[in-house]
Amino acid sequence: RETLNSGNRLRRHGGTAGSAGYVSSGLRVHPDREHLIYPLGSTVILKSLSNGKQEFLHGHTNYVSCVTVSKSGRYVASGQVTYMGFKADVIIWDFAARKIHARLQIHKAKVESLAFSPNDIYLVSLGGQDDGSIVVWNVESKEAICGSPASPHIAGHSLTIQYSNANDNIFVSAGNGTIRVWELDLPNRKIRPTECQMGQLKRIVRCIEVPEDDDFFYCGTSSGDILKVNLKTRLLNSCWPVKQKFSKGVNVLKVLKTGDVLVGSGDGMCTLCSGSNYTTIKKVQLEGGVTSIALRGEGHQFFVGTEVAQIYRFSYTDFKEELITTSHNSAVTGMSFPFGSSELFATCSKDDIRVWHTVTSKELLRIRVPNMTCNAVEIMMDGRSIISAWNDGKIRVFSPESGQLSSVIHNAHSMSVTAIACARDCQRVVSGGGEGQVRLWELQPGLHKLIATMKEHKATVTCIKIKSNDKECVTTSSDGACIIWDLVRFVRNQMVLANTLFRTVCYHPEEYQIITSGTDRKIGYWEVYDGSAIRELEGSLSGAINGMDISHDGNYFVTGGDDKLMKVWGYTEGEVTHVGIGHSGSITSVRICPSRKYIVSTSADGAVLRWKYPHPS
């Protein structure tokens, strides 16, 4: 089996849906000034700044929790989260070879923070709150030198670590009520901490920045102020701002060559402060709390990442933000291509529907409905409207050019609307709900009418597909039934029962067979005429199959599910021809684009991946 070529991913930065919080300082610029480095789920992405090409570092078994780059750029290190009682990996990557240099296992449950020594000799790692230890590793020999509990007993958890810029034996750790400077004693294989004297101040430190000269270091706190501490004497020098603190805390700090300080705060404000008197020089409001600031070169240009999965580019001179990368920051629930066009596609998620340009991966349109989750999206055949199903029981219709709401069907279902399909006449829509009803609606400009309600399913309707003549449709449900409905008489034609929660169904293009799959990991072929089983394939070794699509010629189909693998199958042979490895979360939907050049897949970690279709027409 060949491994499918992962084409381009719609990038996602910041947290991953389901990971422990957001990745603090996850966005880095490589010292070669040519690559951005950031995590997406369990993958580390290297993105070229010149041509936008992406490369993927696969090796983690769960979400990446921290990323750092060595001063020379030779190594990249990343840590992950895992389950309680298991060890969380730290991986050191050889940047030039794009390979794993070392896999280090000692911390339990989570790696909180990582830092390389200035000459790439050591890597220091900090475990999460269930681990609470600091370990120093020798990068060359790939072995642990020594370790120690990160915080004193009277203090809370440590949250971050940073190395000094000149000395391979000195680093700083900080967290809830603790700031410590550590010295490595290599002959005795020990690290010795000195607690910094803070006087009466009690702070939770979120980030540390050590300027080039190593005289002082800065700590950003959850209270919204910044502490300046002398690295030699370990004494607090100053605390600022005194009055106008940074709202929602200081998440990230960067000191520029000029001595000025860049501050990223939890309310999405990126502020440039003077290094001498700490007054605000410039500030810009961004969308979502700032989680990362990465300087390119001397800081003439820098990149800012926020927790809503957006990356901005700034130039130091005019301090204007330019949005360069966007993505979903929670699970993508569905997607749709327009009829006969592969140029763009729509995806839906919590709070919004987005329309993307297929080849460039650029976001063209964002339709927001705050605090609601869109469960399914379809583009009408004439391309004049986007039909969407929402968890508040409404069907919303939007115009694709402007994103304006053109009509709403209120109370379309008593529970959430979970599946939707559009008829080819562009006037009728079939919807399925959480209560198990299937409803047929007629849409006219400015009004809508309920034509029929079909009650057979006992649980959530998960997928609906309409036959090309608009006279029949097939629905699947979590009750283990797949029903073929007559859309003229509104009665059941056939019913297929299986011991599974059905997730997805497809008509073969010739429409005499359907294929289904669900939580039993089987792919079932069924006769439309009498509902009899034709054959059953083992679709996956672990986890449900959530998404499926069949090519227009009916020769191949694609599947994706909880095993995170994208598989291409021959329809008649029932054999896997290609496997795509790239997703970090469960795959939620897959589609072959109408031109049969690409496959697009979405996943529960918010990623959208574009793959090269291996059997082009």
Image (cartoon, grey):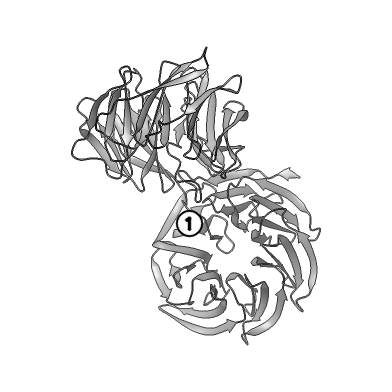
In this picture, residue 305 sits left or right of residue 479? left
- Position in image of residue 298 (x %, y %): 37, 24
Q: Is residue 341 above or below residue 490?
A: above
User: What crowding class fits label 1: few (fewer than 14 Cα within 10 Å), some (14-19), or many (20 or more)?
Assistant: many
In this picture, residue 52 sits left or right of residue 223? right
- Position in image of residue 474 (x %, y %): 65, 74
| Dot 1: element | strand
Instruction: From the image, tell me which residue sits under label 1.
Output: 355
Give the quadrant of the C terminus: bottom right
In this picture, residue 447 sits left or right of residue 145? left
Give the quadrant of the N terminus: top right
**Residue type at mark 1?**
Val
Toward which corner of the image does residue 247 lie, by quadrant?
Answer: top left
Q: Nearer the viewer, residue 487 or 412?
A: 412
Q: Is residue 480 above or below residue 282?
A: below
Residue farthest to the front? 153
Name the residue: 72% across, 51% down: 615
Toward which corner of the image does residue 90 lie, by quadrant?
Answer: top right
Residue farthest to the bottom? 489
Q: Is residue 227 visible?
A: yes
- Position in image of residue 122 (x %, y %): 52, 21
- Position in image of residue 307 (x %, y %): 41, 46
Q: Is residue 371 above or below residue 133?
A: below
Q: Is residue 124 visible?
A: no
Name the residue: 57% across, 27% down: 95
